Image (tube, rainbow, N blue to C red):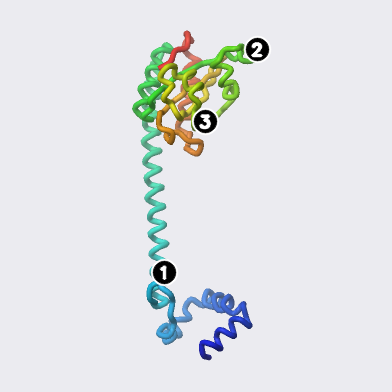
Amino acid sequence: MNTQQAEQTTVEDPDLEKRVADYLSNHPDFFERNSDLLVALRVPHLTGVGAVSLIEHQVRVLRKQLDSERNRLTHLISRAREYEALSERLHNLTLHLMSVSDPEHLRHLLHEAMVREFHAEAVSLKLFPLAAAAEGDADPLTSAFRDFIDKQQTLCGPLTEAKARLLFGETGGGIRTAALVPIHAEGRSGVLAIGSADPERFHPDMGTNFLDRLGEIVSHKLRTIPLEQDSQH
């Protein structure tokens, strides 16, 4: 069969290529039994330059797949190591928090940890009286974060300048993104805010498992110590 005849057969029988492909898939040893065909076959090079044998083409495809799997494995190992390091730091922070007996010491430890572990440029722990929020208190901070009061998971993303100043005071003017960690203590709800001037530092798609666990630990600790007037760093 010449080239013209082959092309006509393909046009007349559009399923021919599929049947050939299915047959070769079901008979992977076909070319072992018909090795002479490999000499006549021409398979385009992956880069579109020249031609290579079917075996070489297959090898290159497998190498590409192997490289992709290696990159994926390297990424997974890197993420696992990062998570292990964060878990160790959270464990150490938890041990330090166990000795805390007053809110000021708690705020100090949290500030140091967030600056060191998350390279935060601003850290603030704010608590809102739940009763006041329910009664429609006009307090600007409570009003601005009313929707956050019942949240159970950390929110990350851009922060308006008005809200940044409410959370971080004068230093909030330069804050562009933040992680807002929900805090739930008895009779009060609040937020542990971690801010950054980098508009890409905290984004909605980032993982928050570490921060969610931190929020639970801080919430539990606040139930064991007397609360004083809120302050910020």
- In the picture of the structure, the residue carrying the numbered disc 1 is 46
Say which amino acid is labelled 3. Answer: Leu
Label 3 vs label 2: CA separation?
A: 25 Å
> Residue 135 has which mark?
2
What secondary structure is found at the residue carrying circle 1?
loop
**Mark 1 → mark 3, Cα distance in angstroms:** 45 Å
Residue in view at x 38 percent, y 47 percent: 77
Q: x, y percentage for residue 122?
A: 40, 23
In the image, residue 201 lies at what x, y percent? 42, 34
Q: Secondary structure at mark 2?
A: loop
Measured from the top left, where is residue 8 in percent x and y? 59, 85
Above or below, comparing residue 200 to residue 101 in the picture: below
The x and y percentages for residue 177 are 46, 30
Q: In the rendered image, which quarter is residue 131 located in?
A: top right
Q: Which mark is residue 155?
A: 3
| Residue located 42% across and 17% down the image | 170
Residue placed at 46% from the left, 23% from the top?
A: 193
- Is residue 139 placed above or below 208 in the rendered structure? above
